[in-house]
Image: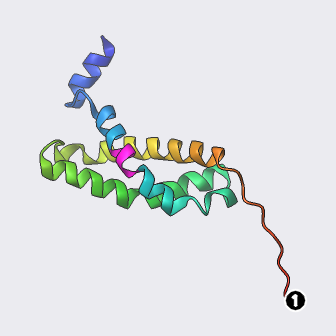
Amino acid sequence: MFGKLLAKLSGSPDLQGTAEIVAVQAAESVWHRVRSRLPTLGMNEARGYIRTRAVPVLNEQIAAMISQGSLPGSRHAKVLDLAGEIVIRTMLQRAATVPARTHVLRRAA
């Protein structure tokens, strides 16, 4: 009951679902932007780094949805926040499953 009331007040019944769609569409592009740097960052730094690299990709996806008429422009910021959190969580989980690279010391002959 409370969820329905909250959805009614927010103006869109499925902003979370829209954010998930945006996050899934942007995930691969964001991964290519952050994958090499994540192993060297702490948790808070990684979250900020992912967010910074994800925003342009997410904005592009959201703008496309707005131009298609499937999302009202007034919901851009909310969907960006929700999708950003989903992407951050996804990238951190994905980075945890990728084995850390071992750095090989190479010496000149």
Magenta span contains residue 24? yes
Is 17 placed above or below 107 here? above
Magenta span contains residue 90? no
In percent of width and height, residue 11 lies at 19, 31
Which stretch appears magenta? 22-26
Residue placed most toward the observer, 25 or 59: 25
Left or right: 9, with 92 as reference point:
left
Quarter of the figure with residue 83 = top left
- Outermost residue to the top: 1
Residue found 53% across the figure and 48% down from its top: 91
Is 32 placed above or below 26 here? below
In percent of width and height, residue 20 lies at 36, 38
- Outermost residue to the front: 109
Residue found 87% across the figure and 89% down from its top: 109
Quarter of the figure with residue 55 = bottom left
Name the secondary structure under disc 1. Answer: loop
Quarter of the figure with residue 82 = top left
In percent of width and height, residue 57 lies at 36, 58
Q: Which quadrant: the N terminus?
A: top left
- Predominant SS along the magenta part: helix
Left or right: 32, with 40 as reference point:
left
- Outermost residue to the bottom: 109
Residue found 67% across the figure and 57% down from its top: 39
Q: Which residue in the structure is indicated by mark 1? A: 109
Instruction: Using a 10 Å C-alpha cutoff, classify the residue at mark 1 as few (fewer than 14 neighbours), some (14 to 19) or many (20 or more).
Output: few
Residue placed most toward the observer, 84 or 33: 33
